[in-house]
Amino acid sequence: MTIVSRESVARWGLALVCAATLLGCGRSEYERRLNATVQVLRTGGAKFPVPGTPLQLSMPRPNNDPFTLYIESSAEPGTNEPVKPERLQPPFVKLPGFRCCFEMKRPDDGGGQLTYYCYMAATPAGELGSDGKPMEESIGAQAAAALNAQAVTDTVSCPAADGTSATWQRVTVTAPQSFLGVAGAPPVTIPAVFQLYGHEIDGWRLIIVWRVPEKISKEILDMVPGMAGSVAVAPPAAEPAAGAPAN
């Protein structure tokens, strides 16, 4: 069964508030969408609205691992302090247009716990990185330099449920990386994969990054093309029926 903590639900709500505010939704419409999304989340099949954009996608849930969603205004778990920067974004590169981060956890064979991340960022289509390079190339180069590793770039055809497909740019960097452990424990550095997918849709350049310990990377990253293929423009909200109260 999918695990959704109260804290997770609250953070989903915060993300949806951002999306609703930026897309012009009224409060009652936001609450309706939030309640509907949380209910679907509990059954493991929600479409996630990328905060601050008109885009939505299917979020994979590998092995039903529990997750926490973070946005920039989130608090560090168990505190009222701002969330740690190294939890919110990759500790070695900052994603322009950052929107949100999913932190997922899985029991390790050795009795510990593995942490892995999915980050989402979105910038206006055509916007370049700080070095003047295309966004995927810019982020990949920065990650490779910080990790003293090679960036491997290719393109991937990502299938959609309706039988169509879209071509995404992919950048993969494999190198030891730092991950946060259980609350209060120091970070650990382990072999891991940083994998970025980038694509333009509806005037946006969407960047999806997964950062996963190498020992579980194949299972997780095999799901990413399906996630990328599910990206679509969210349908407009239905017009209220005649006589219904306005938002």
Image (cartoon, grey):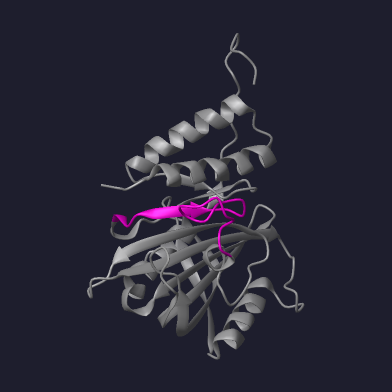
- In this rendering, would 220 be left or right of 124? left
Q: Nearer the viewer, residue 24 or 13?
A: 13
- In this rendering, would 106 be left or right of 151? left
> Residue furthest toward the top?
243
Q: Is residue 86 above or below residue 11?
A: below
Q: Is 140 contained in the magenta span?
A: no
Q: Percent from the top left, x then y, of residue 184?
A: 42, 66
Number of labelled discs? 0
Q: Percent from the top left, x then y, of residue 157?
A: 48, 68
- Dominant secondary structure (helix, strand or loop) of the stretch shown in magenta: loop
Q: Nearer the viewer, residue 229 or 68?
A: 68
Q: Percent from the top left, x then y, of residue 122?
A: 64, 59
Q: Is residue 238 in view from this perspective? A: no
Q: Is residue 38 in view from this perspective? A: yes
At 53% from the left and 71% from the top, the residue drawn is: 196
Q: Quadrant of the C terminus?
A: top right
Q: Is 78 contained in the magenta span?
A: yes
At 73% from the left and 65% from the top, the residue drawn is: 126
At 53% from the left and 90% from the top, the residue drawn is: 150
Q: Percent from the top left, x then y, of residue 13?
A: 52, 40
Q: Nearer the viewer, residue 213 or 155?
A: 213
Q: Is residue 232 above or below residue 88?
A: above
Q: Quadrant of residue 216?
A: bottom left
The stretch of residues the image draws in magenta is: 64-84
